[in-house]
Amino acid sequence: MFRAWSSRIIAASNSLTRRHLEWVFRVASTRPLAVICLFAAAVVLAVAMITSIHFETDIFRLFPSRQPALRLLLDSLEWTGSANEAYFLLEGDPPSLPAEAGRFAERLGQARVDGQPAFKRITWRIYDESQAASFKELIAYAVIHPQLFIQPDDLPRFVARFAPDQANAALQQLQANLAGQFGGFASGLATVDPFSLRDLILPRLKTGGQALDLDPASPYFLSRNGAVLIMIAEPARPVQDMVFARKLVAAINDARRGSPISISCAGAHISAVLDEAAMKSNVLVSIVISLLVVLGIFYIAYRRLLPTLLIPLILACGVLFALGTAGLFLRSIHIISFAFTALITGIGTDYSIHIYDRFHSERAAGKTSQEALELAILDTGRGVFTAAITTAVPFLALMVSDVRALYELGLLVGLGVIYSLYATLFFLPPLLLFMERRFPITYRPIPSLGLPRLWRAVLRHPAVVATGSLLMTAGLCWAAFSITFDGELKNLQPRHSEAFLAQEKIERNLSIAPKQILVALEGRDLPDVLERVSRLDALAASLQARGQIVAWSSLCRVINSQKTQMELSLRLREQFGGARLEKSMRGALDRQGFATGQFQPFLNGMSHLQRAVPVSPEEAVARLSASPLKGVVDRHLVKTATGYHALAYLHYSGSTLDLPAFQAALAALDPAARVTGIDLISNQLKDAVRNSFTGAFLLGGVLVLFFLLAHFASMPSGVLYSLFPVAAASGCMLGTMALSGMGLNFMNAMVLVTIVGMGSDFGLYIRFRVTAETSGERERQYVQIGRSVFLSAMTTIVGFGSLALTDYGAMSSIGWATNLGVGFITFFSLVTLPAAMALKGFSRTG
């Protein structure tokens, strides 16, 4: 019953396809003006839809943000404002860097966009002169509340500073400083900290929340090796405002023009503008090159100008209609997905090649124009129609993916293939009929490209060819098991763009370690959140002791937890509770000749030491936020409508940190903690891509199988002949990639989808056409369809392969992988399949 039911479906499908092609042929050949008008209206609608599409450049938008690691990264960028910061790397003669940085910062401060300041803030010094007053207030508070800031191990040294001998020594040093060149800023700090207690606090404040590996002796954001000074600025508007971003980049270029030092830029605004420009340039170059080569191949093969000139129109329709239709579903498209235009250039030309080749061959064989065109559209057209559907369906099946990169490329390529097919079917017949009337020629056989010799060579030794093909396939499939997956996200960016190179300089010169993990501890109660952070610090300290991480930063590395404060407060009360501390310190100042009146705030604060109690987290955060350490607070603690988000950063090198073990330890310590990092994001995205791709691959494979069964209803072996190149080429492509050191990545995995469609197409063409009873006729059929297959392979390699010239590593790998895949498909279709057919015996139905 099932077999009868499926047979009826297949028969109905074949009948529908035949009638549909007859209708297309009738309309295209008898009403060309109506077809042209209809397509012109469709072009206008498509252009209107395209103008509503927004093109994005953020690589993180390519992937599902519901992935935990990526979601936390995006949240943290939004919370901390890092997503909108701009970074400037200044390189040159180290002694001149600070002065040049000051001049460049001044020019940036004067930069205007639409009459308004381009930047909200510009920072390049540890403590800016404008922050002197707030820094003084922080020191005044810190020295009389050491329980909040001082390391427990440093408390004895802090207490010792109040001993008479050390107090006198500190005041003598202060006199020397005030008398020397340090009088300005030092005199202000001296009134709130005459005994230099800050020396025991500042190192922790400076390094505890440090995000970059800076020179500790420099007052600037200078790398430890002295090679790079970094400047951080906050643009006035968000990166989503692309008009502002483009004007901002222009303003930056004006500001750095003529500078005697090298100034490079990174950041979201710069990347958005530069990556967009680089991507457009890359895609445009790929399209132009591939189109010119494709047109050259077509013209050299067939020597007809008008059919050659029709190809750009067909491809333009495929691209415009695909983008226009996508505009109905998508409000934005990632700029990387626009690379589908190069793919359409390769695939969309195939249908013109097959139909025109059949038309030309039949005319050369003596058929009339009408007879040749009917055979081309209704006979070859049926195979072309099935081939286009089996190519488009695997791509469209990618729409089930929640990975945006796969979804968009699948949608655009699938639609582009279908629209290119229909543009060919509607435009080519009237053009050919027009040429027959206005520019008649004597049709001569098309060059055979050496295919007769190949056919005879294969048929002389079919067993040797088949055995050799199977052995090669087996060997390369074995090698395919060793292929790796490249999850490096930065390969999705242009490798030579300024933003990419600047980011690499930051990693090379300013990163504390090559890799970083971010842990988020969240809740509505601030004391509870900070207590959890202190427990995380204990875990991080143990990891650092074992050499698994290089360093870490958190808010509790700058301030003490409530528990630690209670212990330190008790020890302070024990040390100073019974002492007449204020009188003692006043006496020390009098003995050294200081007027004690100007030190009165410090002397009044001695009572805080004698009655020390823990500082509330809210007060501690408020004090830090009002000081030059506001940036440290903003980086490590964020308050939103949902509560507090404490962030801790762990820095590590290579494989020194066992990520699964760390995640397990973190889950045991704090089950609610969230964690992210580039390695974790890559792993989760790898799983998402694999799951999405597997589902789409299976769905597309089932649909392709159905269409092949429908096409070969009377020739069941045709399905096997069509699918063999798919399986063999996939394995050989992966094996060759593994042997050459090329791995799969987020983008080139889609080449497997291309192989599913094209591999079945090429096998379908060979098995569908080579069915004659006599050997001479079979050879003629093989040469005709083999030439079309070979030329289609060349145009596909040109279209996809042009991506190999792009500056995007992942996109470039699409081109290289496609060259391998299509090359193997062509070999198995033109060489192995004829050998298999010869061994089995040529038949129309077997």
Image (tube, rainbow, N blue to C red):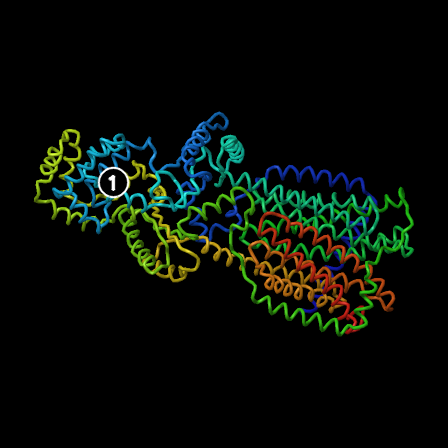
Where is residue 510 shown, x and y percent of the image? 42, 46
- Depth check, front residue: 165 or 520: 165
Residue drawn 66% across the image and 59% down it: 820
Q: Quadrant of the N terminus?
A: bottom right
Residue 592 horizontal side relative to residue 243, left or right = left
Q: Quadrant of the C terminus?
A: bottom right
- Depth check, front residue: 694 or 299: 299
Give the amino acid type for the residue marked by disc 1 in the picture: Glu
Query: Which residue has dot 1 on it?
Result: 619
- Depth check, front residue: 623 or 393: 623
Residue drawn 67% across the image and 69% down it: 472
Figure quadrant of residue 314:
top right
Q: Is residue 377 placed above or below 624 in the rendered structure?
A: below
Q: Secondary structure at mark 1?
A: helix
Q: Is residue 477 placed above or below 487 in the rendered structure?
A: below
**Residue 88 visible in this rendered orientation of the protein:** no
Residue 86 horizontal side relative to residue 356, left or right = left
Where is residue 340 shown, x and y percent of the image? 64, 48
**Residue 272 visible in this rendered orientation of the protein:** yes
